[in-house]
Amino acid sequence: MEESKNTLYSAVQPTNNLTIGNYLGAIKNWVALQDDYNCFYAIANMHSITVRQNPAELRQRTLSLLALYIACGVDPEKCTLYLQSHVPAHAELCWVLNTFTYVGEMERMTQFKDKSAKHADNINMGLMDYPVLMAADILLYQASVVPIGKDQTQHLEIARDIAQRFNNAYTPTFTVPEGVYLKIAASIRDLLNPDKKMSKSAENVNGSVFLSDDKDTVMRKFKRAVTDSDATIKYDPENKPGVSNLLSIYSVFTDKTIAEAEKQFAGLGYGEFKLAVGEVVADKLAPIQSEQAKLLADKAYLDKVLKEGAERAAYTANKTLSKVYKKIGFYQI
């Protein structure tokens, strides 16, 4: 990893199947950013257990997600790709940062309220403490850049507040991170309900296109995508959310501008338009799925990537943790 580059941190949980929204909002950007930044990309399995998981499924999804990252173009030689639980410093720094975080702040977090409502039978401390662990994730690596969607703004603000609190209490220790907002992440909407973001945990799976969907499934979902009665293929998110969503998806999967996409589909019917969008998505997913399957068949290679990634991540993380322990007065040998 090059020290001269700014450090960037990002992570995704290995829960549920990822959608094309996750791909466009996170993984595709990870690939684009890995040449320009010193990137730390984590599989956030510690965050995952704030909601009860099936242990065997969690292990399987962890390897599946790792293989997916690499199949999409994330290069373990260019970035630090690792599993969160393989670096104990995440949990250790989280404990210290808890003492710089106020209960009222955590109770006000939108995600805590939402998840508490969804999982009323399991409102655990991990669910409340989630943003502090996320702060530890970022601050351990002295990340100056964190790519986020609008729904993560609160979490980044808390991370910044905690970093500044610690820096003010002692001496400057943490880099205060800046968020880079990824517009495309917010613009990929549910195919059946374009008022909502496409989600990997949506109640109706037909509104989300998963990276694991085969071509027939992809085409069926796009054929059912909601449009409108206007019959004009034009980008207008407020008045034509369904059509605008399809144009957004087509645009990013083909690297064409929205204007170019509008021009291409001018005069065509919605049926033909939806099929064309489905085709480009299915054609993009097929080689990724094939490469992911090949990687999953080579567990020794995936284990090697995780081992080397954990070693690189721990080297940086432990340097930060050691400074923190020294400043707060922990006796070290």
Image (cartoon, rainbow, N blue to C red):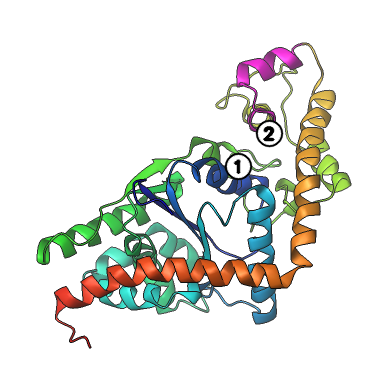
Q: Is residue 49 visible?
A: yes
- The residue at 58%/77% (across/down) is 52
Q: In the depicted view, which residue is nearer to us: 51 or 169? A: 169
Residue 104 sits in which quadrant? bottom left
Instruction: Assess whether mark 2 and mark 1 are in contact (beta carbons under 8 angstroms).
Output: yes
Q: Determine whether the residue tagged by mark 2 lies in a helix, strand or loop.
A: helix
Left or right side of 157 for 72: right
User: Which residue corresponds to the image point at 49% horizontal and 70% vertical from the top-left?
Assistant: 310
Which residues are drawn in magenta?
A: 248-266
| The furthest residue to the right | 216
Residue drawn 11% across the image and 66% down it: 169
- The number of discs equals 2
Q: Nearer the viewer, residue 45 or 290?
A: 290
The image shows residue 16 at horizontal and vertical percentages of: 66, 63
The x, y position of residue 5, in whole percent, is 37, 45
Can the viewer see residue 17 in this picture? no
Res. 24 mark = 1
What amino acid is labelled 1 in the image? Answer: Leu
The quarter in which the N terminus is drawn is: bottom left
Task: Find residue 14 and report its image quarter.
Answer: bottom right
Give coordinates of residue 226: x percent, y percent. 73, 35
Residue under label 2: 253
Q: Is residue 159 left or right of residue 271?
A: left
